[in-house]
Amino acid sequence: MCMSILRQLFPYQQALRDWVQGTGELPAAIPELGVRYLLTGQVRLQDQEGQVTVELLDRATGHRLPGTLTVDFPRLETLRTGFMALLAQAGLPVPASQQPKVLWPEDLSLTVFTRLGQGLYTLFSAFSNGEQTVSHPQPFAEAMQHAPHSYLVLNIVGGVAALQQRYTEAVRLFEQALAINPVGVDAADGMRQSGIATGNEALEESWTIHKARMQGKDVQRALAQMWTQRGKKFSQNGDYPHAIVAWEQALAIQREFKNRAGEGTILNKLSLAYDALRQYERAIGYYEQALAIQRGVKNRVGEGPTLNNFMMTSKARQAPRLAIFYGKQAVNVYQAIRGDIQTLDKALQQSFLTSKAGTYRTLADLLITTGRLPEESSKPP
């Protein structure tokens, strides 16, 4: 559960309450998050069954796909089968090899469903209100008491424990969930995230491998992603030497699989780390490698940031003309991408431009500082 996203969507408690009650407006922050598919719906309960009316919106095309799904307590097989059919109708089919994994044996009564809903609403309301703990966890305790063998209950309550940094309890609950549903990707990810949060690298690595196998993905590629994220965490903490070690591991895997685009991405990250350590010559060497690869595979999405970073490093080395040279190229790449995304949702276009505004500003400042008027291509969008 990413509470930072929740706060973006519902910045105050009333907004969350209105949304849950079906009277709220579509959260204004959704375009900023770059969400393409948006699923909304309402549950109507009657006796021991229910129905949920849903709408799947493709924000890139504006296409809306409505549907009505049966909520068949306690097994929920009809609900899950119906949802997979909706995804297939939307052109997002669940691969045949993965479909059985979606239909694990579940045991969720209407009573437990209600308790989980109450608990999650209390949790989300607390975090939306800026609180860090849930003062009334009773609904989760009751859900556990009534459904001790429900994968959904164990996984959700495990996620709550992890959110509240009770990682020992979280791991225990995720393990119980996985005993019921050995291919429960969400619980496996909970184990992986618990390993990351506690600095238990063995736990993180083990469950990165398990999760990849559950999803039918390549294990080595998953490990490359793990090393990449580990490097990012070190970098965010200012520990650039350890970030470099992690990214070198990721780079070795990307090269082993001849993943040129991935290799270019990691080389760019390494250049940033050496730049932060003021080892500019090494940074430039990695930038040059990254840029050659990105241009070779026509990866403009990666090329633009590399050129931007080249500009920033040149600026730090007191080489403004070189900085301007690379900055202009970065702006040209962004302008080309801007032309390619004209058919996308306006909010998605604006999100892209906003994320690149720093490049335009830095280039304009450099041009002004050196006494050269900004060219039209360097003006912020």
Image (spheres, rainbow, N blue to C red):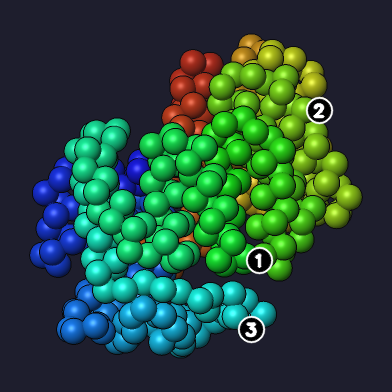
Q: Quadrant of the C terminus?
A: top left
For disc 3, the neighbor class at 10 Å (few under 14, some 14 to 19, many from 20) is few
**What residue is at 51 percent from the left and 76 percent from the top?**
105
For disc 1, the neighbor class at 10 Å (few under 14, some 14 to 19, many from 20) is some
Place of residue 130 in the rendered image (x, y in percent of width and height, measured from the top left) = 23, 34
Query: CA–CA distance between discs 2 and 3?
Result: 45 Å
Question: Is the residue 148 above or below the residue 317 in the image?
Answer: below
Place of residue 358 in the rendered image (x, y in percent of width and height, measured from the top left) = 46, 32
Give the mark nearer the N terminus: 1 vs 2: 1
**What residue is at 59 percent from the left and 61 percent from the top?**
179
Amino acid identity at mark 3: Ala
Q: From the viewer's side, name the closer residue of 241 and 350.
A: 241
* Contact (Cβ within 8 Å) of mark 1 with mark 2: no
- Mark 2 lies on residue: 285
Amino acid identity at mark 2: Gly
Question: Is the residue 102 above or below the residue 368 in the image?
Answer: below
